[in-house]
Image: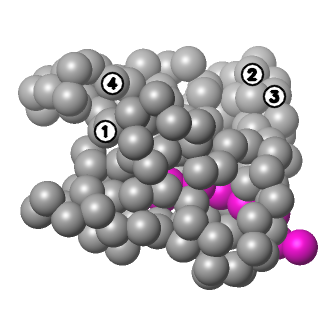
């Protein structure tokens, strides 16, 4: 993606009132989340339009905050290395875990292939998998979120 395309995505995010957006084009993927500062920027026009501008700005912000808090409080399993994410031990095999599965500490969650080595990624704590955040066979970066889970 070019810098101009990313700027267009940011402008779309600001104009739409959405809390976050993820766009993937081929191998490129960008995820943009509106920081808390955006509320202050959106509030800047309020003095010019007073009560009329306040109602549309305040409406979208209030519902977004409760929706974002539960996601932010869930622990995340992050990629410890750069490589390719695999959800199963071999092509055609069932996934190690899927959303809704209960996992124990030390249980294999996925494999990350790095430099032709298959690295099993294990759960650090027991919990219930809430979401798988990476598609099978896609590259991952160090520290990229792979799963969210709810601790037991």
Badge 2 crowding class, 10 Å Cα cut-off, few under 14, some 14 to 19, many 20 or more, is few
Q: Name the residue tied to disc 1.
A: 138
Q: Name the residue tied to disc 3.
A: 59
Measured in 3D between alpha carbons, the distance from the residue under mark 1 to the one under mark 2, in whole angstroms, is: 39 Å
Q: Residue drawn at (49%, 56%), measured in percent from left and top?
A: 110
Q: On the rendered structure, is 23 left or right of 103?
A: left
Q: Is residue 37 above or below residue 39?
A: below
Q: Residue drawn at (89%, 73%), measured in percent from left and top?
A: 152
Q: Of the residues under marks 1 and 4, which one precedes in the sequence?
A: 4
Residue 103 or 15: which is nearer the viewer?
A: 103
Q: Position of residue 40 (x, y in %)?
A: 58, 50
Q: Does the magenta run of residues contain 146?
A: yes
Q: Which residues are magenta?
A: 141-152
Q: Residue drawn at (69%, 80%), measured in percent from left and top?
A: 105
Q: Position of residue 10 (x, y in %)?
A: 36, 30
Measured in 3D between alpha carbons, the distance from the residue under mark 3 to the one under mark 2, in whole angstroms, is: 5 Å
Q: Is residue 59 above or below residue 31?
A: above
Give the secondary structure at mark 1. loop
Q: On the rendered structure, is 67 left or right of 113?
A: right
* Location of residue 107 by image quarter: bottom right
Q: Of the residues under marks 1 and 3, which one precedes in the sequence?
A: 3
Q: Mark 3 touching mark 2, by CB under 8 A?
A: yes
Q: Name the residue tied to disc 2.
A: 56
């Amino acid at each position: 993606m070019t810098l101009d395309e990313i700027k267009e995505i940011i402008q779309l995010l600001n104009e739409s009132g959405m809390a976050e957006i993820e766009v993937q084009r081929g191998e490129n993927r960008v995820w943009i989340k509106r920081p808390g500062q955006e509320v202050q920027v959106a509030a800047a026009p309020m003095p010019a339009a007073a009560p009329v501008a306040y109602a549309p700005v305040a409406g979208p912000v209030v519902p977004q905050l409760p929706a974002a808090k539960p996601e932010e409080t869930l622990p995340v399993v992050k990629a410890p290395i750069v490589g390719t994410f695999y959800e199963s031990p071999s092509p055609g095999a069932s996934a190690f875990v899927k959303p809704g599965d209960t996992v124990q500490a030390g249980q294999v969650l996925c494999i990350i292939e790095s430099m032709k080595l298959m690295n099993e990624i294990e759960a650090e704590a027991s919990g219930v998998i809430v979401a798988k955040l990476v598609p099978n066979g896609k590259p991952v970066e160090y520290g990229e979120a792979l799963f969210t889970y709810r601790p037991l």
